[in-house]
Image: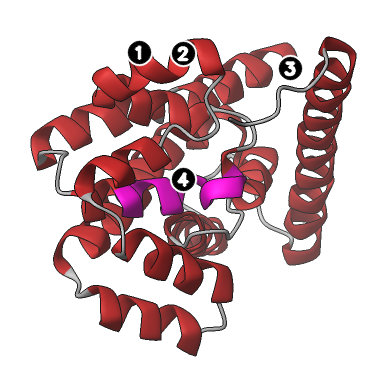
């Protein structure tokens, strides 16, 4: 049985996580502004070739990083938000869905041995270890792995409602411990217990919070 952290320690962890996210937001904001000034383009003018190039390359980088297990991708989205403002919320929303679908497809259709070798080749040892560990599990055990970060009181509910488990796991602070959004989507594909259409609906819901926060923050920062 996992050890339950004392309430005081739990709040310290929550505050540490929130502080880390706040730091990421601040750093992403200043990094985005620096890039905009360095390249000297008008972020509000989407007809500008440089602005289009930065946006497209940023979205591609975001998709690739978010799709890979244990690789943080939120910093890229925050940098794009800092540059282009809330206007980029919708592209980032669809890019997030694309990243999760890419990971899901890899887990569902790519042989595990090939997937593990690929992760080893690009230096993602934790991701390779994740594939090895989950490859030895049954489909039910793989689904259970999706809710490893869930509070104990919700664990049984989430296991019995796997779509809710997926949405919760993708948005739960600390999910980087089991691979982040890319790793969770990979496990969902490997499990064979998530139909493509249901997975797509689930990630479409799970991907909403950050773009919504970006839109709200964009209005507040005006």
In which quadrant of the rendered image does the N terminus lie? top right
Residue located beneath label 4 in the image: 181
Main SS, magenta region, reads helix
Real-space Cα separation, disc 4 to disc 3, in angstroms: 30 Å
Q: Residues within 10 Å of mark 2 (few under 14, many from 20)?
A: few
Task: Verify whether residue 177 appears in magenta.
Answer: yes
Q: Earlier in the sequence, mark 4 or mark 1?
A: 1
Of helix, strand and loop, which one carries label 3? Answer: loop
Where does the image place residue 145, in percent across and percent down from the top left?
Answer: 41, 42
**In terms of depth relative to the viewer, which is nearer, 90 or 53?**
90
Residue 154's disc number: 2
Span highlighted in magenta in the image = 176-187
Question: Are dots 2 and 1 in contact, CB under 8 Å?
Answer: yes
Q: Nearer the viewer, residue 43 or 221?
A: 221
The quadrant in which residue 195 appears is top left
**Which residue is the site of mark 1?**
157
Q: Nearer the viewer, residue 72 or 93?
A: 72
For the C terminus, the quadrant is: top right
Q: Which residue is mark 3?
A: 222
Residue 171: image location, x then y, percent? 51, 28
């Amino acid at each position: 049985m996992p050890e339950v952290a004392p309430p005081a320690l739990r709040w310290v962890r929550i505050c540490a996580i929130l502080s880390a996210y706040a730091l990421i937001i601040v750093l992403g904001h200043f990094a985005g502004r620096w890039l905009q000034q360095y390249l000297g383009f008008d972020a509000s003018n989407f007809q500008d070739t440089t602005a289009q190039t930065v946006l497209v390359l940023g979205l591609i980088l975001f998709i690739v990083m978010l799709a890979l297990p244990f690789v943080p991708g939120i910093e890229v989205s925050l940098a794009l938000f800092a540059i282009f403002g809330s206007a980029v919320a919708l592209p980032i929303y669809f890019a997030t869905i694309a990243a999760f679908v890419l990971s899901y497809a890899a887990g569902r259709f790519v042989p595990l041995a090939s997937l593990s070798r690929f992760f080893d080749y690009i230096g993602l040892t934790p991701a390779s270890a994740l594939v090895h560990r989950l490859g030895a599990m049954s489909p039910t055990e793989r689904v259970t792995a999706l809710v490893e970060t869930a509070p104990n009181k919700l664990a049984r509910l989430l296991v019995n409602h796997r779509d809710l488990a997926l949405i919760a796991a993708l948005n739960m602070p600390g999910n980087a411990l089991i691979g982040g959004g890319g790793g969770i989507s990979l496990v969902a594909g490997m499990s064979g217990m998530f139909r493509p259409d249901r997975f797509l609906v689930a990630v479409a819901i799970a991907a909403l919070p950050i773009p919504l926060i970006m839109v709200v923050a964009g209005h507040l920062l005006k």
